[in-house]
Structure formats: structure tokens, C-alpha cells
Image (spheres, grey):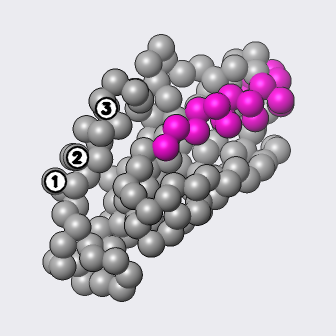
Amino acid sequence: MESTVVQVATGKREVVHDITGECERFAASRGGDGLLHVFVPHATAGIAIIELGAGSDDDLLAALGDLLPADDRWRHAHGSRGHGRSHVMPALVPPYATVPVLGGRLALGTWQSVALVDLNLDNPDRQVRLTFLAG
């Protein structure tokens, strides 16, 4: 098992941030077959495998906005308005994903990408742990 941490600056806005390139580089540097496990060690972020760049990322943010409004309904209420929803989001967009790796390449579908999903306006810097389990 080999592991590394990637730093991701998400800024002060809700974001679906593409980390496919970082995942591809890490898997390629390990070569061979195995599994790439992607994990974000934050209570307010998630990992999604989703089509990016064709509006799906904006659709995901809109759907999460509908399901988890940024208002004052949340019992977990410190931080920016609606911060409590960021703590609920990982139940819908989990903080991890596992991708098969074949010959050092991610075995994603044609339109699939790996993305960090972050609704938390209070934490602009994230870490993503990439772990390669050789087959």
C-alpha cells in the first residue's frame, strides 16, 4: 500500500473541483493493477465520480442546494450561515471513492471524473489522501 496527500485550494465558494489529473498521475507512478482509494479527511467535504464540464457539476451543486439549503435551520450552527449543511453533505456525497487501476491507468468510464465536492465556505484549503493498493 502506498499513500500520498494532495493539497486542494477550494476558495471561498461552493465547488466541485476536478482531481482526476492528480489521481491519474499518482496511479501512473505506481504502475500495474490495483485500486486507487480517494479519501478527504474533512467532516464537510465529499468525493464524487461524476461527469464534469458539461453542466453536471453545476447541477450537483444546485441539487445539494435544494436538499441542503444554506439557511438557519441547522442545529450545528457555528461558522457561516448554513454551515451545518456542510456537516450533513458527506452522508449524501461520501468522503471517499475507490477506482480500479489497470496497467497504471484509472478504469473510469468515458465521461467519468473524480471530484472533490465542498460546500464549506469557511475552509478554503483541503487535503485529499490518495492510496494505491496493488493487486
- The residue at which mark 1 appears reads as 66
The part of the image, by quadrant, that contains residue 83 is: bottom left
Q: Which residue is mark 2?
A: 62
Q: In this view of the protein, which residue sits in the foreground, 43 or 121?
A: 121
**Residue in the image at 18% along x and 79% along y:** 72
Q: Which residues are magenta?
A: 17-34
Residue 21 included in the magenta stretch of the image: yes
Give the SS element for disc 3: helix
| Residue 50 seen in the figure | yes
**Where does residue 79 sit, x and y in percent of width and height?**
38, 81
Q: Nearer the viewer, residue 122 or 34?
A: 122
Q: Are marks 1 and 2 in contact (CB under 8 Å)?
A: yes
Q: Residues within 10 Å of mark 2 (few under 14, many from 20)?
A: few
| SS state under label 2 | helix
- What amino acid is found at the position of numbered circle 3 in the picture? Ser
According to the image, label 3 marks what residue?
A: 56
